[in-house]
Amino acid sequence: ENKYLEKLFRECTRVTCVKNFKRRIVCWRESYTPSMQTMLDNIDQAVNEGKILKAGNSNTIARVDVDQEVFVIKRYNMKNWTQRIKRIVKKNRAVNSWENAGRLFFHHVPTPMPIALVEHKWGPFRGKVYFVSRFEKGVSLDKFLKRENIVDDEKQFIKREVKSLLSSLKQLRLSHGDMKATNFLVTDNAVMITDLDGMRYHQCSHSYEKAFLVDKLRFLENWRHEIEYLDTFSSIFEEISL
């Protein structure tokens, strides 16, 4: 796995890497078409011309079309020079998203496919950074479960998929860091986990158990007013903890 993760950041069979004084771009080679290259070279323009899904101070999320495919760009905005200096010695959140998505992809854990990482910089100083993933059509877990017309088969599907997802994360010693229901995407055939910039791999079992408890409490907090789902997900955590 470590060799695989290292290859996510350099030129190799699967990944193409463009690096110079002002920027770094890594992209899945099969996705690095001329149109994708143009988009990544002008990524701020792509964000501004795309469909804005979120416009916040810390990040901006936009949906864009390239080669008749749909992608999501998450731009991590630079607030001040303090952040710029911190990024010299600390991995930024876009890098975390790229690495974590690659790790999940390697282990076949459902998450939107990572496509590219873009870093604007000036020598060692990083500016705005961007994480590009494939757009997945679906709805957030809370919206899916709170529909009035939900049926038992759909509830069983959710229970099965969430249990499989949480079990995989536990086996891999990965904590998410922000298990809001909106960070779980329900598609036609899976429940995917998103927003991976705070995900962390724990070498130490004690460290992981503490983080696992935080994730568990945050996830269950989503359902404090939904007793049926609170019971369902509580039982799932009990089962995967055995």
Image (tube, helix red, strand yellow):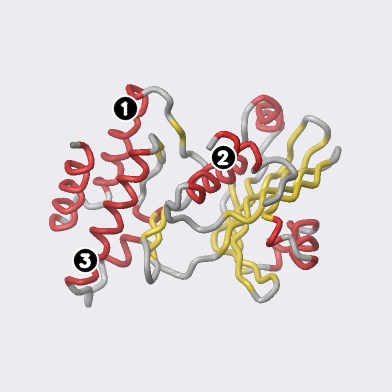
Q: Secondary structure at mark 1?
A: helix
Task: Identify the residue under disc 1.
Answer: 210
User: Where is residue 152, by image quadrant?
Assistant: bottom left
User: Local crowd at mark 3 within 10 Å, few (<14), some, or many (≥20)?
Assistant: some
Q: Are marks 1 and 2 in contact (CB under 8 Å)?
A: no
The amino acid marked with disc number 1 is: Lys
Distance between mark 1 and mark 3 Cα atoms = 29 Å
Residue 151: % across, % down: 19, 74
Q: Earlier in the sequence, mark 2 or mark 3?
A: 2
Residue 185: % across, % down: 40, 60
Residue at left offset 57%, top offset 42%: 99
Q: Earlier in the sequence, mark 1 or mark 3?
A: 3
**125 sits left or right of 219 in the view:** right
Residue at left offset 80%, top offset 56%: 41
Distance between mark 1 and mark 2 Cα atoms = 20 Å
As displayed, is residue 182 above or below residue 126? Answer: below
Q: Earlier in the sequence, mark 1 or mark 2?
A: 2
Task: Identify the residue under disc 2.
Answer: 96
**126 sits left or right of 111 in the view:** right
Residue at left offset 20%, top offset 65%: 156
Count of picture labels = 3
Task: Identify the residue under disc 3.
Answer: 155
As displayed, is residue 150 above or below residue 234? Answer: below
The amino acid marked with disc number 3 is: Lys
**107 sits left or right of 70 in the view:** left
The amino acid marked with disc number 2 is: Asn
Q: Secondary structure at mark 2?
A: helix
Residue 204: % across, % down: 39, 22
The quarter of the picture where the C terminus appears is top left
User: Where is residue 145, by image quadrant?
Assistant: bottom left
Say which of 70 and 101 sits in front: 101
Q: Secondary structure at mark 3?
A: helix
